[in-house]
Image (spheres, helix red, strand yellow):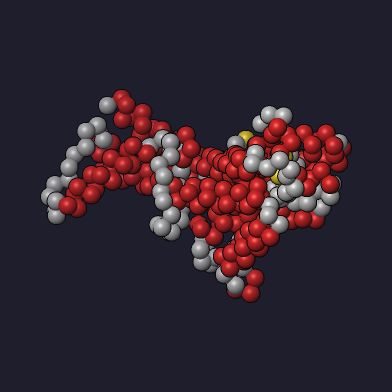
Amino acid sequence: MNRFGPNSLSDGDGWFRVGTVQVTTTIAAVATAIISLFFAAASPSFFSEGFWLSWETLRRFQLWRIVTWPLVNSISIWTILSIAVLFLFGREIEARIGKHRFAWMLAAMTLVGGVASAVVFSAYDAPTFVAGIPMGDPVAATAIAGVAELVQGLFLAFVLINPRARSFFGIPLWLFVAVFQLLDILSAVATRNWPQLANILAIDAVVALLVRAFGVTEFEQIPKIPLPSFVTGDPYQKANRAREKAQRAKQKSQGADVIAMPNTPRRTLEPLDQAYMDVLLDKIGEGGLDSLTRDERAKLDEYSRRLRDN
């Protein structure tokens, strides 16, 4: 992708349908952020003070705030812009990695960022820090709140996946992201806002590790960590690894017969069916199970049943 522009999600990519709208992970996240604005307008003190993360709330062991802080958003143009960016970049990333992986990415960013801030908060007796969108309330000066840091993480995820993407006037998008990240970090350092700095760095680390683990970035310098199938959304990882191992063994043998793997689909499917199944497995390996269309998933289920019957 050379320029930024929304990708199309195929039919069936949503978790469920509301009318004609497929509710994807991105749509669900955007809807939650918008709904939070109505709650903030209806009951500012109850909603905001009930969900943000601060040193004082940690002292009262209100640990649910470690994951609820992004729900606290001020009613401002900056919040609207953040939600717009969440939609635009979120749907791009989700189209590439699938709804399951994107949901886990958002959850990991929220949890790890909240834990990192909480750990730093615990080292202070009189916190005077804020992260995210300013709340316009003096109490907000002691809180971690808002979706801004999650949006910064999505910026980073997008450029790691699309390092050659360009923005306005053909300027590389990674340059904008680097500037925004640097300003955010310098602002936290200048104000000695260590909880916010911990939040930023933790979210950046989570994003980098996840896009590398999902195999959607070309930056091999990032360590690749193994993830369970319930995170990747790929139940055929073992089959993929066995097939790749057989292919490597074939290459090492320099033209020798292919090494037969026990109980592999190659021994039980017709050549054309096996070739098509290989294509489907490759597609899953690149984008997860969610990258398959409804017909492709049905075909894969059919092959699986035939393999079990044999």
Residue 144: x %, y % from top left: 71, 44
Q: Position of residue 2 (x, y in %)?
A: 53, 67
**What residue lies at 31% left-to-right and 30% top-to-bottom?**
307
Q: Is residue 85 visible?
A: no
Rendered residue at 31%/42% (across/down): 241
Q: Position of residue 189 (x, y in %)?
A: 65, 58
x, y percent for residue 38: 82, 40
Q: Looking at the image, is 222 positioned above or below residue 109?
A: below
Q: Is residue 219 visible?
A: yes
Q: Nearer the viewer, residue 97 or 135?
A: 135
Residue reaching furthest to the left: 256
**Residue beneath the point at 19% across and 49% down:** 250
- In the figure, residue 268 lies in which quadrant? top left
Q: Quadrant of the C terminus?
A: top left
> In this rendering, would 150 be left or right of 303?
right
Is residue 135 found left or right of 205 in the rendered image? right
- Camera-side residue of 186 and 136: 186
